[in-house]
């Protein structure tokens, strides 16, 4: 995204909220992770639920690659009328990080007073795996020092205890729904339409586990 894109996004954000109060303000969510963690699927489930509730929803995969090991970033914005799918830097109401170093990398997008939902989970990059670099220490502690409203837990462990570590994306989705105050939606019905039938029960349990965080 170039400088003009950023300027246009900020202008669009101002236009969206210029005649509207808090009840219809455009809200912005940034989901970041590593390919293979289900970041995009979680974003699609979230977007489907928001559309069901009657919001105008824009979702965009802006950065990264979806293949396993590459960084994945998706933007989800919703409100009465959303002009741009791009979350401007410093304007995300919630940042959801599927891996803790990704949280640190994208923290500048979180607005002051925003909420950080971070998976206390490590995925080692190739330089770390080959010994050319070291995985950072004290990541969660540093994040909490910068963001008072940080919710940190190991979604991978929770999902694994439910039977499949791949469900960690839906655990994080549940925590995000709680953070945004969207519990009144029928998320079980949304899951029924967006995940394979044989995995529905697992994903419902994963979602409920995330809500409990």
Image (cartoon, rainbow, N blue to C red):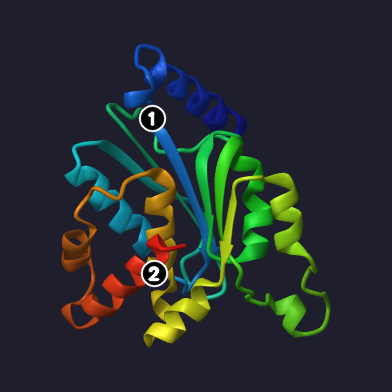
Residue at position x 77%, y 73% in the image: 135
Residue at coordinates 43% horizontally, 53% vertically from top-left?
A: 176
Q: Is residue 156 left or right of residue 59?
A: right
**Which residue in the protein does label 1 denote?**
26
Q: Position of residue 86 (x, y in %)?
A: 46, 38
Outermost residue to the top: 19
When asked about the image quadrant of residue 6, the answer is: top right
Query: Would you say 122 lies left or right of 88 here?
Result: right
Q: Which mark is residue 194?
A: none
Query: Would residue 153 appear left or right of 43 to someone viewing this image?
Result: right
Rendering coords of residue 92 (x, y %): 52, 39
Residue 1 in sight here = no
Q: Dot 2, crowdedness within 10 Å: few (<14), some or many (≥20)? A: many
Question: In the picture shown, does residue 164 fall above or below 196?
Answer: below
Q: Are the residues tagged 1 and 2 within 8 Å (C-beta)?
A: no
Q: Is residue 37 above or below residue 117?
A: below
At label 1, counting other C-alpha atoms closer than 10 Å, the crowd grade (few under 14, some 14-19, many 20 or more) is: many
Q: State the image coordinates of residue 175 (x, y, percent, origin top left).
A: 43, 58
Residue at disc 2, secondary structure: helix
Q: Label 1 vs label 2: CA separation? A: 28 Å
Q: Which residue is mark 2?
A: 209
Q: Quadrant of the rendered structure where residue 154 is?
A: bottom right
Q: Position of residue 87 (x, y in %)?
A: 49, 38
Q: Seen in the image, is 165 located left or right of residue 45?
A: right
Instruction: Report which quarter residue 77 is drawn in.
Output: top left
Q: Nearer the viewer, mark 1 or mark 2?
A: 2
Tally of numbered discs: 2
Q: Nearer the viewer, residue 169 or 183?
A: 183
Q: Residue at x 77, y 85 (%)?
A: 130
Question: Residue pushed farthest front?
Answer: 212
Of label 1 and label 2, which has the lower sequence position? Answer: 1
Instruction: Give the SS element for disc 1.
Output: loop
């Amino acid at each position: 995204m170039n400088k003009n894109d950023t300027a246009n996004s900020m202008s669009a954000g101002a236009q969206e909220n210029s005649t509207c109060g808090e009840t219809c303000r455009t809200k912005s969510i940034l989901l970041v992770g590593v390919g293979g963690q289900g970041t995009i699927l979680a974003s699609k489930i979230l977007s489907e639920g928001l559309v069901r509730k009657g919001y105008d929803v824009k979702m965009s995969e802006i950065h990264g690659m979806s293949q396993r090991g590459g960084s994945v970033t998706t933007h989800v914005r919703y409100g009465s009328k959303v002009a741009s799918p791009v979350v401007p830097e410093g304007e995300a109401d919630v940042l959801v990080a599927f891996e803790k170093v990704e949280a640190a990398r994208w923290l500048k997008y979180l607005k002051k007073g925003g909420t950080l939902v971070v998976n206390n989970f490590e995925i080692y990059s190739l330089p770390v795996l080959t010994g050319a670099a070291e995985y950072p220490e004290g990541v969660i502690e540093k994040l909490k020092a910068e963001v008072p409203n940080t919710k940190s837990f190991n979604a991978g462990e929770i999902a694994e205890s439910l039977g499949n570590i791949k469900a960690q994306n839906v655990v994080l989705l549940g925590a995000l729904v709680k953070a945004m105050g969207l519990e009144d939606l029928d998320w079980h019905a949304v899951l029924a339409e967006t995940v394979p039938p044989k995995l529905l029960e697992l994903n419902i349990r994963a979602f409920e586990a995330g809500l409990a965080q």
